[in-house]
Image (cartoon, rainbow, N blue to C red):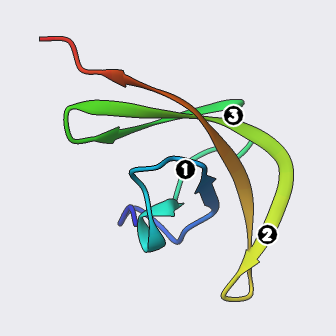
Amino acid sequence: MNNTGAPNVLLTGAPALTGAARLRHVADVDVPKVKVPLGNRYEHFEASSETTLVDDRELRVFIWTHSTFVAE
């Protein structure tokens, strides 16, 4: 989880993200896309119209689309 705030999004579909790592805080949940750094790459997610409840908190669902590697 990102320590800048309470989780407000759930990232789904990324093979490398499991458990609590799928819960994130983003400054603006109305953005169409989110890019998350993970090791030597970025995981890309697109916003869906879905929300889900996790620990009585409504989270916006973002769906994984692809990975890109960090340029050297």
Tell me what residue is drawn at x 51 percent, y 47 percent.
14
The residue furthest front is 15
Instruction: Looking at the picture, tell me which residue is in the foreground, 19 or 53.
Output: 19
The residue furthest left is 72
- Give the mark nearer the N terminus: 1 vs 3: 1
Instruction: Tell me where residue 12 appears, x and y as whole percent.
Output: 62, 53
Q: Quadrant of residue 37?
A: top left
Estimate how packed mark 2 is, as few (under 14), some (14 to 19) or many (20 or more) residues with alpha carbons within 10 Å.
few
Residue tagged 3: 31
The residue furthest top is 72
Circle 2: element type: strand
Tell me what residue is drawn at x 68 percent, y 46 percent.
62
Task: Tell me the quarter of the image containing the C terminus.
Answer: top left
Task: Tell me the quarter of the image containing the N terminus.
Answer: bottom left
Tell me what residue is drawn at x 52 percent, y 58 percent.
25
Residue 11 higher or lower than 38, as above or below = below
In the rendered structure, which amino acid carries the disc numbered 2? Answer: Thr
Q: Position of 51 compared to 60: left or right?
A: right
How far apart are the alpha carbons under marks 1 and 2? 16 Å
How far apart are the alpha carbons under marks 2 and 3? 17 Å
Residue tagged 1: 26
Residue tagged 2: 52
Q: Position of 29 compared to 25: left or right?
A: right
Residue 38 higher or lower than 59, as above or below = above
Tell me what residue is drawn at x 36 percent, y 31 percent.
42
